[in-house]
């Protein structure tokens, strides 16, 4: 019975570094701390337009965090996250405008509503697999703008609604855009921490198991439909929160902001960033914000063209996304340093 | 091996089902541990199982032999709910046929499917923890120690992705992962496939230990008839969707002629 005695000790088949890709970069905490300090310093160092852009990066980052749960963790495709973004964006527009509710209510309210909608849609939709889920979610994304226009009395129709953002309290001495940036940063940080926590938990492992081998997960007692539905609802909740932040930052919502294109761009950004990486959402959001803006100067059709080319390049050259490239680079640097 | 500690204490909470029910011990009064009657199953129009009749007592280790295409894998898949079937499969009197696999797993049936099905990018430790999905968190550390005692090889690889292990190690991981669930009934589909003879023997040593020490009922589909007859207490021979021959391994075994004559020309 004593196998250890019979077989003796064995050398590791694969080295630590090569084996566990999560240990490639030796200073994750330090890097995170530096990033955090830099992120906090941003509004005091850059001009308002740059601050606005970086705020949008964080907003899209939150949405992509959620989308990555579906794409990267659950291994499915959603083309409907623009709809949840729209829901989250119209909550502050309606609740703090016509209804006169205070600003702090908007965020939890839209989180709750988006979670509920995600659950309601996820229950039937996630029984469908793969491409069918993509089609169903696409239908949702298609339906949302006309629905918003149809109920013009509440939503302002195709004219849209202006949204008032929470303004900086007087004690802080900050400008409104700085305050908003820090607010969005705080929400993004909490969202990021919550996702990390989820992925390290029992539910996170179950999700990974479902993604890798649903049959094997099932016979170990993992309830596939329940996990998939719940993660879809979580993902929708992130999109809803991002929608509220979006409305605050942009100050205006209209049906044209939430077309099918937005859903598709979000999915593309998730893939370009790296769907199963912690850095993926941030990189995807940077791609989403800066690539079109940078190409804008060259002409009207150029942003779409450039974005499309970048997507094709990344998918061909780096299937794990920009985050995958970053990981490879980090590994190379760490090895170089380790040899010295 | 002879000083078998009958550790019923190995399952302080009786496994996932809470099986300290005295009537469930397979005694004459209670229903048998596993009773399969009239089980028919297949894939679409193709009928694979044509009325299986089988009773397995608690703590037995049963080997299922038979030529390719006899329906051995389908039998296991039907027992664990991965294939729908007709007839009746009762676990301690509870009908489990028609339940989803995850519900069957919740009743203490764990299936190690053909081809292992380890979660390749996840580490060995994560794989084992997923095995303990249904266990309470406070038990997991103890379960992990127990499983690693059975498979000390895995200890050195805990933080490596499962995909980097060798075939034999992955098979051990698959069995270890199943043991993390503290099953009452363990279904194994050709655990020896692709393994070196010495590795296979080691694996069967563990299976026998699990069976004897922990009282886990084991049903193992095995192509290697000699090995199966050596380790199992009883062997069944399947042919075209039926149980063609059943008997104590000792009775089938002596010459092993029965089995080899039976299986030889067909393999």
Image (cartoon, coloured by chain):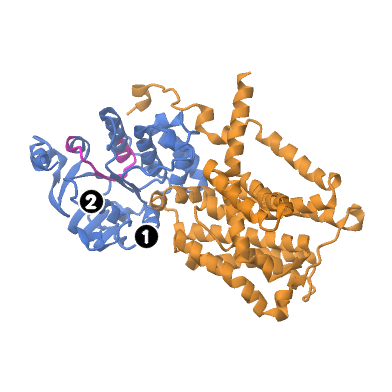
Chain colours: A orange, B blue
Q: Secondary structure at mark 2?
A: strand
B124 left or right, relative to B88:
right
Q: Residues within 10 Å of mark 1 (few under 14, many from 20)?
A: some
Q: Quadrant of residue A149?
A: bottom right
Q: Give how far across and how far down residue A169 sits, in percent.
A: 88, 58
Q: Residue furthest top?
A: A340
- Magenta range is B209-226
Q: Which dot marks residue A102?
A: none
Instruction: Please state which of residues A297 and B266 is positioned toward the viewer in this rendering.
Output: A297
First along the sequence among labels 2 and 1: 2
The CA distance from mark 2 to mark 1 is 22 Å
2 and 1 marks on the same chain: yes
Q: Quadrant of residue A140?
A: bottom right
Q: Which residue is mark 1?
A: B100
Instruction: Please state which of residues A287 and A136 is positioned toward the viewer in this rendering.
Output: A287
Asked if the stretch drawn in magenta spans residue B211, the answer is: yes
- What residue lies at 59% left-to-right and 49% top-to-bottom? A309
Host chain of mark 2: B
Q: Which dot marks residue B56?
A: 2
A184 left or right, relative to B96:
right
Compared to residue A96, the image places residue B221 above or below, namely: above
Q: Residue furthest bottom?
A: A153
């Amino acid at each position: 019975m004593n196998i250890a005695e019979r077989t003796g000790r064995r050398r590791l088949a694969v080295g630590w570094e090569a084996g566990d890709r999560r240990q490639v970069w030796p200073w994750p905490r330090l890097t995170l701390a530096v990033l955090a300090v830099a992120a906090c310093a941003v509004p005091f160092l850059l001009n308002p337009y740059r601050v606005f852009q970086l705020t949008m990066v964080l907003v899209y980052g939150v949405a992509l965090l959620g989308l990555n749960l579906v794409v990267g963790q659950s291994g499915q495709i959603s083309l409907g996250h623009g709809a949840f973004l729209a829901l989250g964006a119209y909550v502050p527009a309606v609740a703090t405008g016509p209804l006169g509710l205070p600003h702090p209510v908007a965020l939890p309210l839209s989180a709750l509503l988006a979670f509920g909608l995600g659950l309601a849609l996820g229950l039937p939709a996630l029984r469908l697999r793969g491409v069918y889920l993509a089609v169903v979610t696409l239908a949702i994304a298609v339906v949302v703008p006309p629905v918003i226009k149809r109920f013009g009395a509440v939503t302002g129709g195709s004219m849209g609604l202006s949204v008032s953002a929470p303004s900086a309290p007087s004690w802080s001495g900050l400008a409104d855009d700085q305050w908003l940036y820090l607010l969005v940063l705080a929400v993004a940080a909490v969202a990021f921490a919550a996702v990390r926590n989820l992925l390290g938990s029992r539910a996170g492992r179950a999700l990974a198991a479902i993604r890798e081998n649903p049959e094997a997960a099932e016979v170990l007692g993992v309830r596939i439909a329940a996990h998939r539905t719940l993660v879809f609802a979580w993902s929708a909740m992130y999109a809803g929160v991002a929608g509220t932040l979006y409305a605050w930052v942009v100050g205006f919502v209209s049906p044209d902001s939430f077309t099918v294109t937005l859903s598709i761009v979000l999915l593309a950004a998730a893939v370009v960033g790296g769907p199963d990486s912690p850095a993926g959402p941030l990189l995807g959001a940077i791609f989403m914000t800066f690539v079109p803006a940078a190409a804008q100067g060259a002409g009207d059709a150029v942003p779409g063209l450039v974005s499309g080319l970048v997507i094709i390049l990344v998918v061909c050259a780096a299937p794990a996304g920009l985050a995958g490239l970053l990981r490879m680079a980090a590994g190379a640097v760490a090895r170089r340093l380790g040899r010295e | 091996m002879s000083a078998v500690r009958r550790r019923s204490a190995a399952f302080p909470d009786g496994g996932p089902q809470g099986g300290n029910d005295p009537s469930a011990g397979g005694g004459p009064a209670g229903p048998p541990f596993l009773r399969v009657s009239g089980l028919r199953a297949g894939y679409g129009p193709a009928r694979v199982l044509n009325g299986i009749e089988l009773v397995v007592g608690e703590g037995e280790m049963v080997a299922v032999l038979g030529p390719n295409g006899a329906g051995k894998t389908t039998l296991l898949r039907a027992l664990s709910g991965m294939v729908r079937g007709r007839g009746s499969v009762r676990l301690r009197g509870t009908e489990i046929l028609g339940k989803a696999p995850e519900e069957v797993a919740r009743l203490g049936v764990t299936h190690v499917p053909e081809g292992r099905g380890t979660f390749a990018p996840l580490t060995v430790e994560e794989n084992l923890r997923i095995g303990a999905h249904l266990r309470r968190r406070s038990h997991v550390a103890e379960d992990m120690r127990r499983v690693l005692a059975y498979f000390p090889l895995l200890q050195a690889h805990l933080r490596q992705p499962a995909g980097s292990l060798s075939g034999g190690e992955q098979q051990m991981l698959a069995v270890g992962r199943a043991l993390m669930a503290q099953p009452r009934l363990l279904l194994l589909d050709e655990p020896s496939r692709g393994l070196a003879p010495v590795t296979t023997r080691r694996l069967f040593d563990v299976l026998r230990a699990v069976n004897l020490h922990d009282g886990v009922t084991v049903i193992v589909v095995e192509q290697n008839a000699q090995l199966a007859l050596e380790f199992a207490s009883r062997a069944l021979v399947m042919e075209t969707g039926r149980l063609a021959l059943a008997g104590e391994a000792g009775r089938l075994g002596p010459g092993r002629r029965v089995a080899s004559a039976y299986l030889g020309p067909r393999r």
